[in-house]
Image: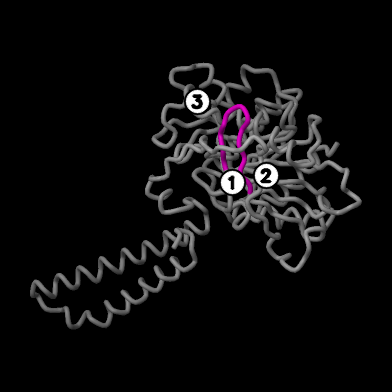
Amino acid sequence: MGLTSNLVLVLAVLSAVLLFAGTVWLWPRLARRSLRAVSGRVGLLLGTQVALFAAVGLAANQAFGFYASWADLFGQEDDQGVVVDHTPGDGPVRVVDTRSVKGTAGEVRQAGGQIQKVEIVGRTTRIATPAYVYLPPEYFQPRYRTRTFPAAVVLTGYPGTAAALVDRLHYPRTALRLAREGRMRPMILVMLRPTVAPPRDTECVDIPGGPQTESFFAKDLPEAVRAHYRVAEKPGTLGVIGNSTGGYCALKLAMHHPAVFAAGAGLSPYYKAPIDPTTGDLFQGDRERRNRADLWWCLRHLPAPDTSLLVTSSKAGESNYKDTLKFIERVKAKELTRISSIILNSGGHNFNTWRREIPATLEWISGRLSDR
C-alpha cells in the first residue's frame, strides 16, 4: 500500500477513531494507581496520538503532495535519475501510459484531450525524469493535423510530485475548461517536478560536478518536447509556470533564457536560491553561479531580458509579499522585461491558493505565446 493510497489514509483514520473510543471505554478500568493501569493509560494515550498525527499527516500529504512514496518520506530515495538506458531507436520522450482528463472519461481524445505519462531523457545532461503531458483535444482533430501548438512547462514545488499537478492542482482540467470557454488557446502542458535528482533539491542550478538541472530545463527539455510533439521551433512558443520552488525556477529560466521561454509565471515564488540541508552545496565556491541564481543580482547586473514575467502573492498568508512588491518595482524599471502580478487579499502557501491563481495564470501565458 503506497503512501498516497486512499486505503492507507482510511486505515489511519479508522485506527485513530478506534483507539480514541477504546481509551474512553477502558479509562475507568485503568483508573487505578498500579503499574499495569498506569502503563495501560500511557499506552492508550500514546497510541491514540500517534494514530491521530499519522492520519493528519497522511491527509496533508495527499492534499499537498509533499512525498510520493514511503522511500521518499524516509529519505531512502536516492536514485539520481540519470542512469536510464534506451535503445538507439528510442527518442528522448517515451510514453508509458495514457488516460483521459478527469471529468471526460466518456469522451474520446478528440473531444476531451489526453494525459500521457512519459519518461524524458536529456540528450546532453543525461538527466532522466518522469512527467505528465496534457494534449488538448485539437491536437487529435483532423483539421488541426498540421498545426503546431504553444507549450508550457509546469513545475511543482519541492519535494512535490508531478501527479499533484494533474490530480491536485488540476492543470489539464482547467486548461480544457478555459479553452472551451474561449478564454485561452489550446496549449500543450508538460508537467514535472524540478527535483530531477531526488531527494536533492537542485534549485534548477547547474551544479559543478553534479546534475546540470538548468541546462536540462533550458536545452534538453525543449528539444525533447519539440522532437516528440507538434510544438513550433520558433522562439515565443514556450513558456514556464511553477509554484514555490517551481515558481523561482520559472522566473529564473525565463530571465536567463528569454530566447527559449517567452514567458515565466511564478506562483508564490522566492527570488534567490537557498542553501540548506536539502540543497547541499549548490555552487561549491563558484561566485558566478551563485550570483546567477540570485534574481535580485540578475536585475541589478545583467541586461534586461526580453521576456514576460508573472508573480503572485497574498497580502495575508504569504511570506513573500513584500519581496514580490519590490521585485515588481525593480522589473518595471527595466525596458524590455514585462511584469504582471496576481495579488490576493489572503491565501497561504498551499494548493488551495494556487488553484485560485492557476486559471488567470493559464489565460495570461496563453496570450503571450505563439503557436507558429
Is residue 355 something one can see in this rendering? no
Question: Residue 94, percent across and down?
Answer: 65, 44
Q: Position of residue 250 (x, y in %)?
A: 63, 36
Q: Is residue 134 left or right of residue 290?
A: right
Q: Which mark is residue 159?
A: none
Q: Tell me the crowding category of disc 2: few under 14, some 14 to 19, or many 20 or more residues within 10 angstroms, Cα based.
A: many
Disc number lying in front (1 or 2): 2
Range of residues picked out in magenta:
118-129
- Residue 257, compared with residue 64, is above or below; it is above
Reply yes or no: does residue 253 show up in magenta: no
Q: Residue at x 27, y 67 (%)?
A: 47
Q: Type of residue at label 3? A: Ile
Q: CA distance from mark 1 to mark 3?
A: 35 Å
Frontmost residue, 198 versus 279 = 198
**Residue 319 image point, x, y percent:** 52, 42
- Give the residue at mark 3: 207
